[in-house]
Amino acid sequence: MTIPITTALNAYRTAAQGAGAATGESAAAAVQPGQAFADMIKDNLTEAVDAGKKSEQMSLLALQGKADLREVVNAVANAETALQTVVAVRDRVLSAYQEILKMSI
């Protein structure tokens, strides 16, 4: 089942306006379509980078004998989960982009 892009955009716009109304914002102050998604992606990428840095720091502390093994394992597992999430989102975005390219005009 193929959904026209205009239908998807209208649904997103309606949802964004509904979210603005639910939080007490006026329709004029609602987030522009696409901006909230971009901010979400940016925040998640920043968190993934921070998790990777923390796991590296914890690994170095473990080598120096200053960190508990459980803390190191947790930090590495968090970084791995963040990386897997970033890769999954990237794959979905690329898949959606390829589907858009396949659409006839």
Image (cartoon, rainbow, N blue to C red):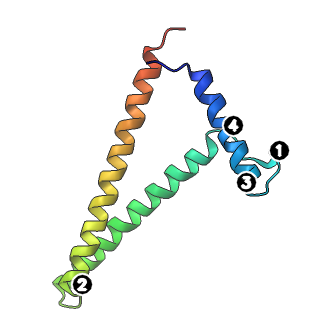
Question: Which residue is at the front of the view, 26 or 99?
Answer: 26
Closer to the observer: label 2 or label 1?
1
Along the viewing direction, whichever of 64 and 80 lies nearer the viewer: 80
Using the image, determine if residue 61 lies above or below residue 34: below
Q: Residue at x 43, y 18 (%)?
A: 1
- Whichever of labels 4 and 2 marks the residue nearer the N terminus, that label is 4
Residue 61 horizontal side relative to residue 46, left or right: left
Q: Residue at x 46, y 56 (%)?
A: 44
Query: How many numbered discs sit on the rendered protein?
Result: 4
Label 3 or label 4, whichever comes before in sequence order: 4
Q: Nearer the viewer, mark 2 or mark 3?
A: 3
Mark 2, residue position: 61
Whichever of callouts 1 and 4 sits on the residue coming sooner in the sequence is: 4
Label 2: element kind? helix
CB within 8 Å, label 3 to label 4: no
> How packed is label 2: few (under 14 Cα within 10 Å), some, or many (20 or more)?
some
Q: Please state which amino acid type lies under the numbered disc 4.
A: Thr
Residues at marks 4 and 2 touching, judged by CB atoms closer than 8 Å: no
Q: Residue sitting at 44 percent across and 63 percent down?
A: 47
Q: Residue at x 56, y 45 (%)?
A: 37
Tag 1: residue type? Ala
Note whether 15 is above or below 73 in the view shown. Answer: above
Q: Of circles 1 and 4, which is in front?
A: 4
The residue carrying mark 4 is 14
Q: Which residue is mark 1?
A: 28
